[in-house]
Image (cartoon, helix red, strand yellow):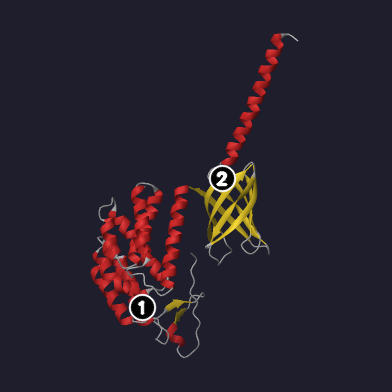
Amino acid sequence: MHTGKLVLISVALLLMSGLKGGALAQTDRVSDQLSGFYQGSAKMPTGSKDINFIVEIKNENGTLSGHVEVEGSQFPLTGSNSHGDVTIKFNPGTDLIITAKAVGDRITGTWSMDGGRSGGVEMKRVSQEWKQIHDLIGRARAEVSQFTGSGGKASDENSPARKWANQLWDYSRQHSGEPEAKKAENEALVLLLGTGLVAEAAARTSPLESSDDVWQRAVMDQLAIAAGNNDYDYVIKNADVLVEQSNRPALKAQIRLAQGDAYWEKGDPAQAKAVFRRVMDENPKTRFAREAAGNIYEIESLNVGQVAPRLESRFVDGHQARLADFKGRPVLLVFWASW
């Protein structure tokens, strides 16, 4: 064989090898893009709350491994990936299978469990930093919950809330401007507010850009947490100092409305009405005044055992209907809406 032909064959083989290697490398690189952390949400049947979860996926040659974190528990996962067609399986008591498609930074599809239950699922890739903050917040909340569950008070000097608030605040300052820093910042403030360290939390926000926005978000988050925990004493005790540290009239009104609701829930309608009247006096002709007036009306007129308010309407045939005409007779009123 001529030397020239040998050279041509060698070059061709090298080119073929390079193309094949390049294709494999490209395939591996695309395949590896699936690996990482994802924040997911599983749509549940009507009447049930959607379930949020975190997934760590490791992809090796189309075989998936990793774990799923859901409602404080962790489950190992197995699965496969073929050209973006993803199957994930784990067992939170019974086998759950996710069948989905990976496109860009999202994985969308359906989930199914034994017994025929199923629904939609969506997962979005998150950064390593997001996962780090998620874990920090999870540990902080767990430790504070354990402390209060064992008899400690959030406002105690040795409460772990302040320790975690300092760690999260330090992270937010070190990573200023990043989305994860904002999340850490807000959680730190909520932890301080939860311990009753309102003035300290306010002092940390004062030098920040958009300080009023940062403060309002943290205050509203803490009020929602307290209401969700039926902790009515929190807002009753701290409403005055929260209002004092707030600049926006709307936020002050919302704090007072929450205080009135807390008195109401605790069975003190007189104090509740006094707070709602204060909201009306301080915020005339606003939606806050209208809400406060509606609450007072409900307290005074819509409780069990009270005389029903005057009600007039028309039957479907056009005849006038008055609730007073049915006095002494059992009446069933059905209220509904189409939203």
Of residue 336 and residue 129, the one placed in the foreground of this image is 129
Residue farthest toward the front in the current orientation of the protein? 158
| Residue 335 in view | yes
As shown in the figure, which amino acid type bears the numbered disc 2?
Ser
- Please give the residue where the numbered disc 2 appears in the rendered image: 35
Q: Which of marks 1 and 2 is nearer the N terminus?
A: 2
- From the viewer's perspective, tell me whether residue 100 is left or right of residue 195: right
| x then y, percent, for residue 60 | 62, 43
Given the current orientation, which residue lies at the most extreme bottom position? 328
For the N terminus, which image quadrant? top right
- Identify whether 236 is placed above or below 139: below
Which residue is tagged 1? 264
What distance separates the C-alpha of mark 1 from that of mark 2? 51 Å
Q: Percent x, y for residue 265?
A: 38, 78
Cβ–Cβ below 8 Å for labels 1 and 2? Answer: no
Looking at the rendered structure, the secondary structure element under dot 1 is helix
Specify whether 150 is left or right of 234: right
Q: Residue at x 58, y 45 (%)?
A: 102
Q: Position of residue 124 (x, y in %)?
A: 52, 49
Q: Residues within 10 Å of mark 2 (few under 14, many from 20)?
A: some
Q: In this view, does 87 lie above or below 293?
A: above
Viewer-nearest of discs 1 and 2 = 2
Q: Which type of secondary structure does the marked residue at label 2 adopt?
A: loop
The residue lying at 64 percent from left, 52 percent from top is 78
Residue 299, located in which quarter of the rendered image? bottom left
Q: In this view, does 254 lie to the left or right of 35?
A: left
Q: Position of residue 132 (x, y in %)?
A: 45, 52
